[in-house]
Image: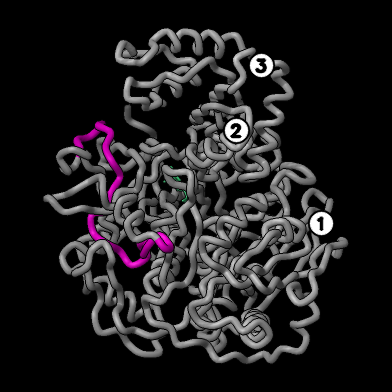
Amino acid sequence: MSKSVFKPNKEFAKTARIKNMCEYQALQEEAMEDYEGFWGRYAKEKLDWIEPFNEVMDESNFPFVKWFKDGKLNVAEQCIDRHLKTRKNKAAIIFEGDRGDKQIITYLELYYNVNRFANLLKKEFGVKKGDRVVIYMPMIPEAAYAMLACARIGAIHSIVFGGFSAEALRDRIEDADAKVVITADGAYRKDKPYMLKPVVDQALEGGSPVNKVLVVERNDEDITWVAGRDYSYNELIKSQEVHCEPEVMDSEDPLFLLYTSGSTGKPKGVQHNSAGYILWAQMTMEWVFDVKENDTYWCTADVGWITGHTYIVYGPLAMGATTVIFEGVPTYPDAGRPWKMVEEYKINQFYTAPTAIRVLHKMGEDEPAKYDLSSLKVLGTVGEPIDPPAWKWYYEEVGSSKCAIVDTYWQTETGGHIVSPLPGATPIKPACATLPLPGIMGEILDPVTGERVETGETGYMCVTRPWPSMIRGVWGDEERFVKSYFGDVKKNGKPIYFTGDGAVYDEDGYITITGRTDDVINVSGHRMGTAEIEAAIKKHPNVAEVAVVGKPHELKGEGIFAYVVLKSDDGVADEVEEVKAINNVIKKEIGNIALCDDIVFAPGLPKTRSGKIMRRILRSIAKGEAITQDISTLEDPSIVEKIENMVKSK
Ligand code: WTA
């Protein structure tokens, strides 16, 4: 089925960095013909090197690939120092608090703030190059300072999203063997204070590798201070010097870890290194958002996710842009908040998740019309497929049918966008990520033959050559890195990077992502492993077995559906209580973001004779679809009908 096509705005295209499809194709061809020449050219042009690199790419030990070998640089310098010559008084960060409080931080102020922070970590806490620092922070400027301070002294940060529970935080601290946690007392949400420090306290209870906790006092609520371990940022920062020599880092020195869900119960610490990551963060900022010198750019993600890393902090600052940090929620005090902010700050590029668009559409369909949104040029979406009605509203009501919508497809592991429209060049289609970006050899392949799939046939979304911002490793687990990403698809007999997503080409060769092929689900744009949720539910003493699947959800994209088999045979005494108890375990083990939308107490699970749970059947039942699979090979085929009836009667 052919979709409507929307051509780029002609006026916009005139000054865009990539102005038309010919320019796009020329770049893509340049990369195909001389891959290393292409990347080497950009690495020299875009980054300021302390010492130049000797080799663009070394893939002799694939998939352990090295980019810009022997080059030396510092990522914090890329994001701050080099802008001081021409942009010292330009706003680097515009902060809006939940309660409407505002701060504008210039590049010079950012330089001072980050250097003070870096000195604090180095001199007061003894943090050294290579040490891991966990950041568990609200959306306040200090979260960005903390990241950049780590980068300045060569420490590896690992941000844990503030919605994760103490247990989840503990696991991540332990896996990374972090010595320091940076947190805040809490922050504000919907005009009320909420707390983070007590969660850190709980995560460190009973022994931990962490010996220092730095607390930014944001909401001044009462917290407990552990003497000798907990320190006030607000106090210590006062006496720090405003200059801190940046650590000389190798291109391949790690920049950060970010834990993400996979197909097992244990999240993986995705590792990104310095030069390749920052290069692609900057290039995609320039190409995909086409931010100009005087523009104001706003990405609504949380720094706890990769989008916050690459497109709130590193990408915008690397290119010297003005980036907005917002503490609050988009629907408070009403669903006009983002549009009010667009008007107030004259935002030029706005980047958010389809879930937010669906919620804003549902709760405030007419809100955009109340504000002057004429500054907007590019609208972005990320994290999950966007549905055509939400796309249409975003395009027409928010963008007045004149802004490009960039449906950016990428992952924690890819570091930056890999498939996305270019706003001045690519004719767009609703809910379609369109084409691989120049330099990215993205292809949809048949998992068995490794050949490119035909139009309309679903295949596996792969990248057939390593690229600079590609994941460098899974922290502490080489084997898992190789197996998770390079085990499933081979092209010409050689293993290549597989994203875990299915995708399909349309008649124009455009790519539409069809969703995960593994047991990862996407809830409100948050990536969750069903195995992780199952592992949490199994901690409930009365649970014998559990299977979690995703189910389409009107607002969240996907909801969490759990089939639970209880240990006691006498059925469920009080279903409401039992559901509450299970959700409490999830809350404790993972956090509120993983609470189930549906829980069904099943008499058993559909399993093969070898004991494998047939999740496909459970997915179909959750969706209310007819079962088309052959169930005769199941250990107990009658279980399917029993579960179906239970779900129907719910
Ligand atoms: C999904 C978020 C459809 C996909 C940046 C991917 C998308 C996972 C899109 C990564 C998109 C991301 N259209 N699906 N534009 N962008 N996804 O690691 O399934 O949190 O594998 O990174 O989100 O989620 P992650």
Q: Which tag, 1 or 3, sits closer to the chain's start?
A: 1
Name the quarter where the N terminus is drawn. Answer: top left
Nearer the observer: mark 1 or 3; the answer is 3
Residue at 59%, 28% in the rendered image: 543
Cα distance between the residues tagged 1 and 3: 45 Å
Along the line of sight, which residue is nearer the eye, 569 or 227?
A: 569
Amino acid type, label 3: Val
Q: Which tag, 1 or 2, sits closer to the chain's start?
A: 1
- Left of 385 or right of it: where is 44? left
Q: Secondary structure at mark 1?
A: loop
Residue 39, x across and y down, in percent:
28, 71
Q: Secondary structure at mark 2?
A: loop
Name the quarter where the C terminus is drawn. Answer: top right
**As drawn, 325 above or below 113:** above
Cα distance between the residues tagged 1 and 2: 26 Å
Residue to which mark 3 is pinned = 572
Residue at 37%, 27% in the rendered image: 612
Residue to which mark 1 is pinned = 99
**Which residues make up the magenta segment?**
453-476
Badge number at residue 612 = none
Cα distance between the residues tagged 2 and 3: 30 Å
- Left of 159 or right of it: where is 626? left
Residue 569, x across and y down, in percent:
60, 15
Residue to which mark 2 is pinned = 555
Secondary structure predominantly adopted by residues drawn in magenta: loop
